[in-house]
Amino acid sequence: MKLLRSYDQNDVSSQTIGIATILGMQEFATQLVNASTETTAQSTFYVAVNKWDDAIRAIQTQDRLKSKSIYFQKAKYMERIGKLDAAKEAYEKSTVSKYSFAKV
């Protein structure tokens, strides 16, 4: 349900993408994402399915602050699965590395 709340509550297509993702209908959700012009919905979907580069690409031109958040989420994910070099790179791009880099 956390994933569903991350989509825009007032946008039916965003909610449909969220529901399709939760139900495991990845192909259908991907088609909806590709047809959508809502970059936040696109990036939220790509984060949910661990397609980090696509998530960053979707949001980077519209919202630089959100892209830093996605880089941070990617860094945490990479750290969790043991890819520390990728985690370090993502932490650096999120600009959080200046403040809390002791873990990596």
Image (cartoon, grey):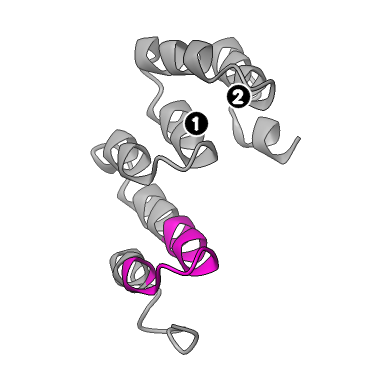
Relative to 48, say whether 30 is above or below: above
Q: CA distance from mark 1 to mark 2?
A: 7 Å
Q: Residue at x 37, y 70 (%)?
A: 91
For numbered disc 1, what is the local secondary structure?
Answer: helix
Label placed on residue 21: 2
Rendering coords of residue 16 (x, y %): 61, 14
Label 1 amino acid? Phe
Horizontally, residue 42 falls left or right of residue 58, namely right
Rendering coords of residue 78 (x, y %): 45, 62
Can residue 92 be found in the magenta stretch?
Answer: no
Query: Where is the N terminus found, in terms of image quarters?
Result: top right
Q: Residue at x 33, y 66 (%)?
A: 86
Label placed on residue 45: 1
Rendering coords of residue 95 (x, y %): 33, 71
Q: Residue at x 42, y 52 (%)?
A: 70
Relative to 104, say whether 53 is above or below: above
Label 2 amino acid? Thr
Image marks 1 and 2: residues in contact by CB distance under 8 Å: yes
| Number of residue marks | 2
Q: Principal SS element in the magenta part? A: helix
Q: Callout 2: few (<14), some (14-19), or many (20+) C-alpha neighbours within 10 Å?
A: many
Magenta span = 72-87
- Which residue is nearer to you in this view: 37 or 55? 55
**Direction bottom: furthest residue:** 102
Looking at the image, tell me whether mark 1 or mark 2 is earlier in sequence order. 2
Rendering coords of residue 57 (x, y %): 27, 39
Query: Where is the C terminus found, in terms of image quarters?
Result: bottom left
Q: Residue at x 62, y 17 (%)?
A: 20
